[in-house]
Structure formats: structure tokens, C-alpha cells
Image: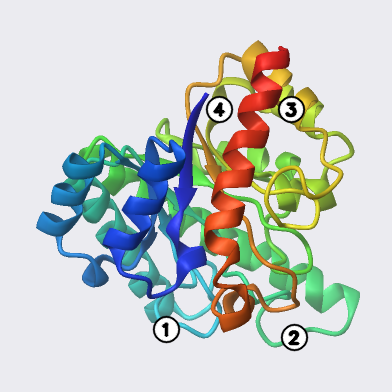
Amino acid sequence: MRYALSNWIYGEEPLRHTFERLERFGYEGIELVGEPERYPISEVRKLSDEFGVQVTSVLGWCIAGIPGRDLASPDEAERAAAVRYGEACVDFAQAVGAPIVVLIPAPAGRVAPSGEPGEEQTWNAGYRSEWGYAVDSVRKAATYAATRNITVGLEPINRYETYLVNSLSQALSFIDDVGADNLKLHLDTFHMGIEEPNLAEAMRRAGESLVNLHVSDSNREAPGRGHTDFLGLLQALREINYQGALTLEPVPPGSNPLLTTQMSANMRLRDIYAEEGINYLKQLEQQL
């Protein structure tokens, strides 16, 4: 397996520090958070060459409350801005040599259709409408990505963080509705631990559609600190001939991951999680 790490968990840490950490612990790749204006292209390419760590993916930062990131919004201008944001992530990915952009069809942090409908009928009507809006938006982003030879990875997020696409089944249905050849699956073991009955079987069902994978344990900490069956998961990935990266995304305990990753008391965990996670998974690989 190839190992990468998603750098959003390090907040505003200088990129050189992150590349140094990844080289030190044997990572081959890095996933960059989708904020193209934050990272000069020349700096990213220089660091990649210097440390032998390639950009394996760009993570679309589709977070509720950030204007222009809601691909499912009933507001046409907001959706158009979100599509432009997706296109900017595609351009950034192409410039730094990353083959994949990860997108969430409705932003993390929005857990109901717009207007917070409190009745079944209005909730279902809003859900259907926003599913259609998101399908149209993602289709536009994927069409643009195809012109740049970039794959879009659709990420389902658990029900406590978003509402539109939570499970593998919903993600596959959404991809079918979009109908773009370059729209594939990006999965996350933490979210799957909430939504899927069996992670290994979900991987087998995903099959060749799976192009990228976020990896953290059942408690969202480094692999080996929870109860996720990573041995079974690795076996399933080998059975489907998974060619993507295992992109670690360990987060310290707490109800707000955007905050807990930045707390001074958790800074020491950055090295600890990065080292523990990759070593644990590599040890499991040796057992297969």
C-alpha cells in the first residue's frame, strides 16, 4: 500500500514542517486541503521534490458557513460559486500533480435541507430538491475536471455531520445520477464505521470505483487506537486491487475536530499519530 496523510489536521502549520514529518515516518504522499490560494505552486513542487512526497489528492474544503462551498444550496448564486471553487481545486490539483480532487456534495456541518424543515413532508421535499441541485453541480465540476484529466472522488460523510450523502449506497446512487466517467468514490473509515455494517464488505462492494481512502480508527484517532478491523479492511483492499493511497486523517478526541486539531495540548500528537498509524498498518500488511 501507498501511504499519505491529509494536512488539514495540521491547520496553519508551515508546509515544510508537514513534509519533513511525512518523510521522517515513511509517507509517500500528502493530501492538501483545498485552499488553492494558501499554497504557492512553486513551493509545493519544490517541497515534493525535496522530500520525495507527492501530492496524491486535494481535499475540497466544503464546510458549512464558508461562502461558495455548498454544491447543494437552493441558492443558484451559491451553487455557482461552489462549482467555481471545485474548478479552482481542479486547477490546483493539476498544477501540483495530484490526480484526484475530493468533493462533498453537501457541506460538512449542514445536517438538514435548507430552512431546517421540521416535518417529514417538507424535509423529504427539501432533500429531493437539494439532491438534484447537488447532482447538477457535481456534474459541472466533474465535466470541468475531465478536461484537466482529474478524477473527482465523492465522499459520503456520516449523518451527524451532513445529511445528503452519508452511506456507500447513497454515494453509488449519486454517482449514477451524475453519470460522469471521472466521478468515483472516496471513502473514509471513520464515517463508514458509523454508516456501514461491515467495512471490509463495503470495500468489496465499492470495488474499482474506489480511488481514495481516508484512514482513522473508530474513535477518529490513529489506526490501532480504536476497534476498527484494519486487517480485514486491508485484505478487502487487496482483493479489489486497490491502487490508491491510504490517506491517514487522525484527529484528537473532542466534539469539534477543527478545534481539537489546533489545541496546544494536542500538538505533541501530530508526530505520535503520524508514526503510530503508518507503523500499525504496515505491521498488519506483513501479516497478509
Q: Tell me where residue 69 appears, x and y as whole percent.
A: 44, 73
Q: Is residue 259 above or below residue 225?
A: below
Residue 67 tag number: 1
Mark 2 / mark 4, whichever is N-terminal: 2
Q: Are marks 3 and 2 in contact (CB under 8 Å)?
A: no
Residue shown at the point (43%, 38%) measured from the top left: 27
Label 1 packing within 10 angstroms: few (<14), some (14-19), many (20+): few
Residue type at mark 4: give it.
Ser
Residue 182 image position (x, y, % from top left): 40, 34
Q: At 53% from the left edge and 47% from the top edge, which residue is drawn?
A: 154
Q: Secondary structure at mark 4?
A: helix
Q: Which residue is mark 3?
A: 233
Marks 4, 3: nearer the viewer = 3
Q: Is residue 283 left or right of residue 140?
A: right
Q: CA distance from mark 4 to mark 1?
A: 30 Å
Mark 3 falls on what kind of element? Answer: helix
Answer left or right for 211 relative to 287.
Answer: left
* Type of amino acid at the residue the image marks with label 1: Pro
Of labels 4 and 3, earlier in sequence is 4
**Gap in Å between the C-alphas at discs 2 and 1?**
18 Å
| Residue at the image position 72 percent from the left and 74 percent from the top | 111
Q: Which residue is mark 4?
A: 209
Amino acid under label 3?
Answer: Leu
Q: Is residue 4 visible?
A: yes
